[in-house]
Amino acid sequence: MVVSGATFLSARAQVSYAPGVSNPCLEQATAWMIGGNHILGAQGLDRDQYVELGTCNDFPLILKANNHQALTVRQSGDVGIGTTNPAALLHLVKPASESKLFTESFSGFPASMWVLNPAASYGLRLDANGTGHIALNESNPLDFLNFTYNPSFNKAQVWVGSMKPDASSVHGNFDFAVNGKVVARELYIRITDWADFVFDENYNLPKLSDVEEYYKINKHLPGIPSAKTVSEEGIEVATIEKLLLQKVEELTLYLVDQQKEIEQLRAIVEKNGQKSQ
């Protein structure tokens, strides 16, 4: 064992040997040197590959750095770094500052952390290209949630599924993308520009004859995207909802005007009918 940062371990250490050794827990009082330590067994034989460092009683194992308790191994096997009372198998504490845990790889290899049990395994992966993934199945990872920083748009991007919208496409500047079906009970879309401007007294309501001429030529209503555009680019939900409401409100104005004309014609007919009697 090589000990760095001090010339020796100041405390006496317990050194235990592999099963079958006559003295399984031998108190070792010799100072440990910075250049490394060569430990001999009870009979003077080389036991380096069998050495265990630990305690032989009901006390935790404590490692110190600069006289500060850095690592604690409790009798239960729980390990604490920065805490003397670990509450889990591994418990990390960084007092008075942000606590960080790093796993790092080099030379184009990915880095990952996994949690697993006999039923499944899930992991957080960082591939060699710098894209992050939450994945299923450690032995053959299946990435289902992906995220990266896109310098072209100066933003983070997140997508579900294997297909990421192409950066050069109309949807390249996305924030969140899903390659599949989304199911929800409620969906709220915030929009500041709604279609109530149709009811403004200065609104220029298109003539029905102009609308007819337009849809006969273009095969869709004015302001509404064509089938080809929708097929290639999809629809922006808030925008299409506003456009559809605009058409409904325009239709309401047409009906109101039509009803006024009907009532005027009815009044004329009734007036003429009275005169003929």
Image: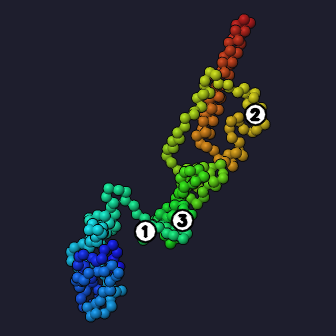
Q: Which amino acid does label 1 sit on?
A: Leu
User: In percent of the image, x 55 and y 35: which residue is there?
Assistant: 192
What residue did someone put label 2 on?
214
**Spatial distance from mark 1 to mark 3, Cα to Cα?**
20 Å
What residue did someone put label 3 on?
127
What residue did someone put label 1 on?
116
Q: Quadrant of residue 52?
A: bottom left
Q: Quadrant of residue 29?
A: bottom left
The residue at the far front in this view is: 7
Mark found first going from the N terminus, 1 or 3: 1
Q: In this view, does 98 lie to the left or right of 54?
A: right
Could you say where residue 108 lies in the image, as x and y percent from the top left?
55, 69
Could you say where residue 163 lies in the image, as x and y percent from the top left?
60, 58
Tag 3's secondary structure? Answer: loop
Tag 2's secondary structure? Answer: helix
Q: Is residue 56 left or right of residue 116?
A: left
| Quadrant showing the C terminus | top right
